[in-house]
Amino acid sequence: MERKEGDAIKLYSQIIENPSLDGREVIGLKQILEDELVHEHEFARGESRFENFLIYVKDAVLGMNDGLVEILSVTKGLAGAFGDPFKVALSDFILGVSGALSMGISTYTNVRTQRQADEDTLKRVVDASRFVGHIFKERVANLMRKKGYSE
């Protein structure tokens, strides 16, 4: 969805640069870009309140699921099937290594996907800032005022 929004902003930016548009159409498209940026900002602000907490909860649940349920269930099954502690320990070691690889690959994929989403957001902001830079200027000014800086 983020990429589609980025594509839409890029398309609006390209259309605005079309010399055949009259002033009223350019103003209308700039208003659409402005609304899109404000909407994105409000969504990001609401989401950021819980983002860190949700990441920790997600990682904890995934880690417990992979670490406990998988290894304990295999250990129980192997202990009943083989009865030999060495075979059970060797199988659990192999399972632990494969589980660690699985979690590592999953984390790598998650980080890569997040980085791509962040890059797409940055591209969208760069495209939109060419036409509605006053929004960014107002946001920076508001942040500076909140930090206690004077006008």
Image (cartoon, grey):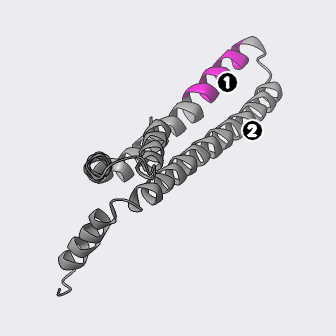
Q: Secondary structure at mark 2?
A: helix
Of residues 28 and 73, the one nearer the viewer is 28
Q: Picture coordinates of residue 25 (x, y %)? A: 30, 46
Q: Residues within 10 Å of mark 2 (few under 14, many from 20)?
A: few
In front: label 2 or label 1:
2
2 or 1: tag closer to the N-terminus: 1
Q: Picture coordinates of residue 73 (x, y %)? A: 61, 21
Q: Residue at x 24, y 75 (%)?
A: 141
Tag 2 residue: 97
> Which quarter of the image is occupied by the C terminus?
bottom left
Within the image, what quadrant is residue 98 found in? top right
Question: Measured along the vertical axis of the image, is residue 13 above or below residue 85?
Answer: below
Magenta span has 148? no
Give the farthest residue toward the bottom. 150
Q: Residues within 10 Å of mark 1 (few under 14, many from 20)?
A: some
Question: Measured along the vertical axis of the image, is residue 88 above or below residue 51?
Answer: above
Q: Amino acid at mark 2?
A: Val
Question: Measured along the vertical axis of the image, is residue 68 above or below residue 36?
Answer: above
Q: Which residue range is magenta in the image?
A: 69-80
Q: Picture coordinates of residue 149 (x, y %)? A: 21, 86
Tag 1 residue: 75
